[in-house]
Image: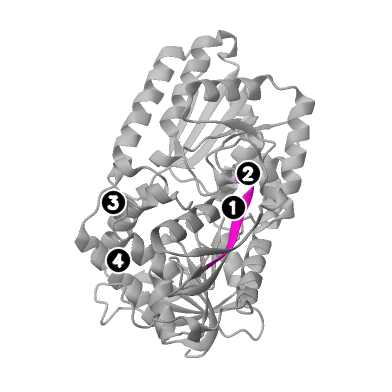
Amino acid sequence: MKDASLIIVYHREPWEEHVVAGSTQWRDHRSPNGIIPTLRSAFGPGEHGLWVAWKKAKDVAHPAFETDVSITRDGTSVAVHRVPLTSDEVDLFYYQFSKEALWPIIFAFPGKLSFDEAHFRNYVAVNRRFAEAVAARARPDARIWIHDYNLWLVPGMLRAMLPRARIGFFHHTPFPSADVFAILPWRQQILSSLLDCDLVGFHIPRYQENFADCACNLSGASRLARAAAPSKFLVTGAALATSVVTTALDHPLHGRVQLGSFPVGIDVQALDRIVDSAEHRARVAAIRAEIRDRRLILSVERLDYIKGPVEKLLAYERLLETMAEQREKVVFVNILTPPADQIDAYKAVRKEVDNIVGRINGRFSTLSWTPVRYFYKPFSYTDVVAWYDAASIAWITPLRDGLNLVAKEFVATCRGSQRALILSEFAGAHVELRHSISANPYSPASMDAALRRALCMPADERQAHMIEMDRIVRGYPVRRWADDFLSALGESAEQPGRNPLARPGSQQRSLA
């Protein structure tokens, strides 16, 4: 395909490829991700669409797979280009540079920063291969939707190759404040690339305003337009609150760029189908039979220092120490999905979690009660939804999180029943789910108060809060997120100052 009108650039393929008895099969990804099927559905009838992702190859010059394939499954057809990367390239690009240099800054943990300039050069080279793959297959005026920080340099490279293209970029993570972002030695290259977009999207206005601060204070952009934050994001006194947000920037070299907030939703219909099934009811009944009449406090997250697993366990230990009446009446189910083995920073976190779980169970267990049920393994999405439905309290207190879809999935599963959601004010979803029980995971007192409130809140109050949050989650599903972003990307092309020929120097700058 050399005339794609819509190109989605995402690190994962739209389906997983499996070879069975010499025949290729395409299957849904094993880990739940409502974003992928939503992006697949963006290619409507008559749309010349293309999906660009990477795929591992022993030899990138002669990969042992087709780099261009056309997939039709469940009534959806998607053309896919796979950029071949060696295992070493993926290791340097994704597991070392992206996760050990960019990730700590994005999530405001500069003390965990580790980088090598050679890794950055590899990152530039991989981004360039993505950009070249897109440019070789795109119409001159194509809409190109690029996803996440792994590909921060692709927009600037593409602008030089396709000056008339409409380029959109969406961050699935937070965007840090200017003083933290400034730690990156490559801050100018990253900002220069993002300012070459037509539209840069974020989950919430706080991240949008952080980017505007970075662009203005570090790169010489100016604010063209500011507006009151949309009412659905207005929350007072929370860490990620902002009442005013920048909606457009101008830069002498890059021209105008639109900014917007588009919080990712969940696939509510798919979740409802699971909850309404007989298999789901049987799973929930089995869990409740095992837990008996105890209240189930649930945590589901990937093992990562940003998720705050240690702080959560310490708060639970304090609860058992100070509220002896809760012993044997509650069970903390802690489900941690293992991270990639290549990421060294997570090994110390797991060791500490293991030690604390062992200490809690050693101190408080009885013959009939284990206070912490700890699972360090991946669960299927249907099993996770069953745990949601069996839980009395969802405990989601990351130290920092871009959004947090687990909170939304829990709310939609419970359908306004008498449950409680404890949510960190440093999770992006907190500004949407304002009826949750707010917690500051850096404050032991705040964590303790939130847990006690969840256990002691009257049933009618719990239900009123869950009903309101269910309305919010169902009112902005993942399909609407994609529609709103693509609609805004189309509108950005009509804004004054968006003539690509008015971008002096865009083809002369180098990101290498």
Residue 123: assigned label: 4
Q: Are marks 3 and 1 in contact (CB under 8 Å)?
A: no
Question: Which one is closest to the eye, mark 4 or mark 2?
Answer: 2
**Image marks 4 and 2: residues in contact by CB distance under 8 Å:** no
Residue 286 percent location from the top left of the image: 62, 34
Label 1 packing within 10 angstroms: few (<14), some (14-19), many (20+): many
- Location of residue 230 with respect to 479 vertically, above or below: above
Alpha-carbon distance for marks 3 and 1? 33 Å
- Give the residues drawn in magenta, as a range: 242-249
Looking at the image, tell me whether mark 4 or mark 2 is earlier in sequence order: 4
Say few, some or many: other residues with alpha carbon within 10 Å of mark 2 (under 14 / 14 to 19 / 20 or more).
many
Label 2 sits on a secondary structure element that is: helix
Classify residue 150 as left or right of residue 479. left
Kind of residue at disc 2: Val
- Quadrant containing the C terminus in the rendered view: bottom left
Q: Please say whether residue 20 is visible from this viewpoint.
A: no
Marking on residue 431: 2
Q: Tell me, yes or no, whether the two marked residues, 1 and 2, touch with CB atoms within 8 Å.
A: yes
Q: Which residue is mark 3?
A: 342
Q: Amino acid at mark 4?
A: Tyr
